[in-house]
Amino acid sequence: MKLFFVVIIYIFLNHCSFDDKTGIWNSNNNISKKENNLFKEFKTLSGSEEFFQKEIPIKKNFTIDLPKKKN
């Protein structure tokens, strides 16, 4: 039984490889360049932009009528 587990572990570990195709051994500079290219087309959001073209004042006696909820 021990021999069986040793053979199975040997088979799994023997076929594992870390080559340059997987990207593990690449330098970090190449990865950061790829990440920068991903976000190049996104726009930055800012709170200083105006969201509306103009504001319309509400009358003082304006009320909102909502329908009653049915449970």
Image (spheres, rainbow, N blue to C red):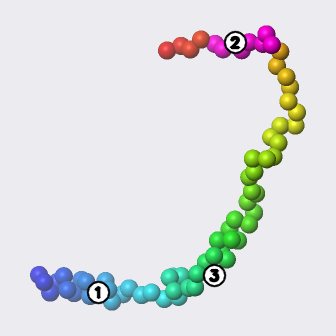
Mark 1, residue position: 11
Mark 3, residue position: 30
Q: Is residue 52 above or below residue 14?
A: above
Query: Image quadrant of residue 65?
Result: top right
Q: Is residue 7 above or below residue 35?
A: below
Q: Earlier in the sequence, mark 3 or mark 1?
A: 1
State the residue at coordinates (56%, 85%).
26
Q: Which residues are magenta?
A: 60-67
Q: Amino acid at mark 3?
A: Asn
- In the rendered image, residue 62 lying in the magenta stretch gets the answer yes
> Which secondary structure type mostly characterizes the magenta part of the structure?
loop
- State which mark lies toward you, 1 or 2: 2
In three-dimensional space, the C-alpha distance between marks 3 and 1, rounded to whole angstroms, equals: 33 Å
Query: Image quadrant of residue 14?
Result: bottom left
Outermost residue toward the left? Answer: 1
Marker disc for residue 21:
none
In three-dimensional space, the C-alpha distance between marks 3 and 2, rounded to whole angstroms, equals: 59 Å
Mark 2, residue position: 65
The local crowd at label 1, few if under 14, some if 14 to 19, many if 20 or more residues have their Cα within 10 Å, is few
Q: Amino acid at mark 1?
A: Ile
- In the rendered image, residue 35 lying in the magenta stretch gets the answer no
Q: Amino acid at mark 2?
A: Asp
